[in-house]
Amino acid sequence: MYKVIGTGKSRAFRVMWALEELGQPYDVIDAGPRSEEAKTYNPSGKIPALVDNDAVLTDSVAIMTYLADKHGGLTAAAGTVARARQDAMTLWLIDEFDAVLWAAAKHSFVLPEEHRNLTIKDTLKYEFERSAKQLSNRLEGDFLMGDKITIPDILAVHCLNWAMGAKFPRVDDKLFAYAQSLRERPAFQAAAAR
């Protein structure tokens, strides 16, 4: 059984949701970022971490990719054009959504006050809104990469949820409906209930 180190209010939720989608059992070890518990698994104290037997893996996207490849779901096969396109979408989401939200969080509460730049948040909200429009234009069906849920969907919806909690501008109706439909999935609901 896997162990997810982190909290449901962090990037660990992505891993929990992926495990639910893959039908894999897991326990959650509640550990906040930089806590002594988190440092037991990752010396930097960053969460999430995943324990798989004797291996400890870090970074939510790397963990989701590992799980998807290992269990044959949430991903196109390695070495295919479909996988290259999926990986491109994943990296775009990391650059255009996750990085922007993380920068906003750092300047809101993570960095010591003397190092925060509150004026940058308006620029970050603008960047996120621009990227959300691009993502909406790319969305052609129920899922980002075709007819089934993949890693980019989990990443995108997690970031859209994060943006709402961070009081970023509301996305357009198409992207809002997409995220809402994925939040209604049983796997999302199961991860949220943990």
Image: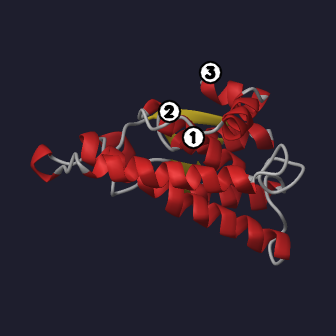
Nearest the viewer among 77 and 156 is: 156
- Label 1 sits on residue: 160
- Label 3 sits on residue: 193
Residue plotted at (83% across, 69% down) = 82
Question: Could you tell me if residue 192 is visible in this image?
Answer: yes
Q: Residue 67 appears at what percent x and percent y?
A: 71, 55
Residue plotted at (28% across, 52% down) = 120
- For the residue carrying disc 2, how many other residues have a C-alpha within 10 Å: few (<14), some (14-19), or many (20+)? few
Q: Residue 91 appears at what percent x and percent y?
A: 60, 66
Residue plotted at (55% across, 44% down) = 159
Q: CA distance from mark 2 to mark 1?
A: 6 Å
Asked if labels 1 and 3 touch by Cβ distance under 8 angstroms, the answer is no
Q: Quadrant of the N terminus?
A: top right
Q: Amino acid at mark 2?
A: Met
- Label 2 sits on residue: 164
Farthest residue toward the top? 193
Asked if labels 1 and 2 touch by Cβ distance under 8 angstroms, the answer is yes
Q: CA distance from mark 3 to mark 2?
A: 19 Å
Nearest the viewer among 114 and 133 is: 133
Secondary element under disc 1, as helix, strand or loop, is: helix
Q: CA distance from mark 3 to mark 1?
A: 19 Å
Residue plotted at (30% across, 42% down) = 36
Q: Residue 40 appears at what percent x and percent y?
A: 37, 49
Q: Amino acid at mark 3?
A: Ala
Q: Which mark is residue 172?
A: none
Secondary element under disc 3, as helix, strand or loop, is: loop
Q: Amino acid at mark 1?
A: Leu
Secondary element under disc 2, as helix, strand or loop, is: helix
Q: Is residue 191 shown left or right of residue 144?
A: left
Q: Is residue 57 above or below residue 40?
A: below
